């Protein structure tokens, strides 16, 4: 997946196909975080 900034984003799925975390440029953010992306 490529976002609007052109960064490669990977979404990891755990049990029951629920996203357990999003890995963005090597940084892992827990699902549900409301922190805005850098540069936006």
Image (cartoon, grey):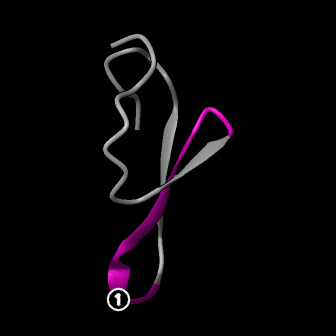
- Residue projecting furthest to the right: 26
Report the magenta residues as a range.
15-26
Residue topped by disc 1: 16
Q: Quadrant of residue 38?
A: top left
Q: Residue 37 location, x and y as percent?
A: 40, 26
Q: Residue 36 location, x and y as percent?
A: 34, 29
Q: Residues within 10 Å of mark 1 (few under 14, many from 20)?
A: few
- Residue projecting furthest to the top: 39
The one of 40 and 18 positioned closer to us in this rendering: 40
Q: Is residue 7 magenta?
A: no
Q: Is residue 22 magenta?
A: yes
Q: Residue at x 41, y 10 (%)?
A: 39
Q: Residue at x 49, y 23 (%)?
A: 7
Q: Residue at x 33, y 58 (%)?
A: 32
Q: In what quadrant of the picture does the C terminus appear?
A: top left
Element under label 1?
Answer: helix
Relative horizontal placement of residue 3, taking residue 27 as reference (left or right): left
Q: Quadrant of residue 5?
A: top left
Q: Residue 8 location, x and y as percent?
A: 52, 31
Looking at the image, is 31 positioned above or below residue 34? below
Looking at the image, is 14 positioned above or below residue 7? below
């Amino acid at each position: 997946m490529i976002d609007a900034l052109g960064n490669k984003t990977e979404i990891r799925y755990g049990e029951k196909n629920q996203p357990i975390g999003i890995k963005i440029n090597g940084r892992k953010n827990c699902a549900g975080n409301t922190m805005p992306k850098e540069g936006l």
